[in-house]
Amino acid sequence: MTKLKVTQVRSVIHRPKDQKQTVRRLGLHRIRHSVIKDDRPEIRGMISKVQHLVRVEELPGDGPGDSKDERGGRGRGTARDRTSS
């Protein structure tokens, strides 16, 4: 499935409450913060509502069973990843 990288590029200050809530529900918290979402009609609708506040890039998906984190942040990894060999 195709993924969308959504990046907030403008502030939500002085914007209507519904636009602020939409940006927040997309998982964005500040300018230049990015999240990766599945390309679904619900997400596309949210993006179209705040298209003047965000930038969208299409990323190729890895197919079913994607193991990437949707939040776009750094994960802690597993114990094996943290130990040195």
Image (cartoon, rainbow, N blue to C red):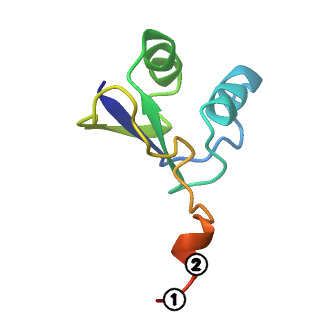
Residue highlighted by disc 2: 82
* Quarter of the figure that contains the N terminus: top left
In this view, 32 is above or below 59: below
Q: Quadrant of residue 31?
A: bottom right
Q: Which residue is drawn at 44% across and 45% down?
A: 68
Q: What amino acid type should be assigned to the residue bearing mark 1?
A: Ser
**Residue placed under numbered mark 1 in the picture:** 84
Which image quarter: residue 79?
A: bottom right
Return the residue nearer the eye: 7 or 41. Answer: 41
Tally of numbered tags:
2
Which residue sits at x=42%, y=15%? 40
Find the residue positioned furthest to the right. Answer: 17
Establish if 33 lies above or below 65: below
Q: What element carries label 2?
A: helix
Residue 54, given in percent of the width and then of the height, sits at 46, 39
Cβ atoms at labels 2 and 1 below 8 Å apart: no
Furthest residue toward left: 60
Mark 2–mark 1 distance (CA, rounded to whole Å): 7 Å
Up the image or down, 26 lies above or below 82; here it is above
Instruction: Name the amino acid type tagged 2.
Output: Arg
Residue at x 51%, y 12% (from the top left corner): 42
Q: Position of residue 3 (x, y in %)?
A: 35, 32
Left or right: where 63 falls relative to 50: left
Label 1 crowd bin: few (<14), some (14–19), many (20+), radius 10 Å: few
Label 1: state its secondary structure.
Answer: loop
Q: Measuring 69% from the left and 35% from the top, which residue is drawn there?
A: 24
58 on left or right of 82:
left
